[in-house]
Amino acid sequence: MSLNKYASKCREFEWELRQCLTNENIDALRKHCAEVGKNDWVAWVYNNQQTISAFLASTPSQRRKKKAWQDPKVKSHLVLAALFQLGYAQHMLEALVQHPLSPGSSYRDMVLRAVDLYEEVVSRELELWPFDNPNPFVRLIND
């Protein structure tokens, strides 16, 4: 499968994950994220990386069989974290297509290509909140 196809599959996977949540789940998640704030959310993601990776690697039927993942709060947290990481994966795959790294060129050319790839990847800041506004991680000045 080509890298373009993998990137395209990321978009399909995003749709699949979004289908796991109802509007009520998203509203409850928004409220929770607004209460805990961005720093605590990022800490939760960091501390639960292994579970998030397992969630991402699971098929829909495997996710349905995992009892701990059926709790609406847990599932909402995992979906939000998985969507964020899926965004990184998609961006990385798209950057690799735009800045291919393949053996055979001089090491100086490879260094330049690697720099271009790195700059492409780190220059894009992904949103922590992939759903409609209001974004719970954005605090207005008047709040």
Image: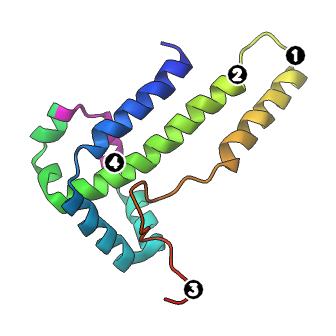
Which one is earlier in the sequence, the residue at label 4 or at label 3? 4
Q: Nearer the viewer, mark 2 or mark 1?
A: 2
- Asked if disc 4 and disc 2 are in contact, CB closer than 8 Å, the reply is no
Q: Which residues are the magenta region?
A: 51-60
Q: Which mark is residue 141?
A: 3
Residue 68's x, y, as percent? 14, 52
Vertical comparison of 88 with 98: above or below: below
Mark 1–mark 3 distance (CA, rounded to whole Å)? 51 Å
Which one is earlier in the sequence, the residue at label 4 or at label 1? 4
Residue indicated by mark 4: 52
- Camera-side residue: 133 or 49? 133
Residue indicated by mark 1: 106
Q: Nearer the viewer, mark 1 or mark 3?
A: 3
Which one is earlier in the sequence, the residue at label 3 or at label 2? 2
Q: Secondary structure at mark 1?
A: loop
Q: Secondary structure at mark 3?
A: loop
Mark 4–mark 3 distance (CA, rounded to whole Å)? 32 Å
Q: Nearer the viewer, mark 4 or mark 3?
A: 3
Q: Amino acid at mark 1?
A: Ser
Vertical comparison of 105 with 117: above or below: above
Mark 3–mark 2 distance (CA, rounded to whole Å)? 42 Å
Which one is earlier in the sequence, the residue at label 2 or at label 1? 2
| Within-10-Å neighbours for mark 4: few <14, some 14–19, many 20+ | many
| Within-10-Å neighbours for mark 2: few <14, some 14–19, many 20+ | some
Work out which residue is located at the far top of the displayed protein and give it: 104
- Camera-side residue: 55 or 136? 136
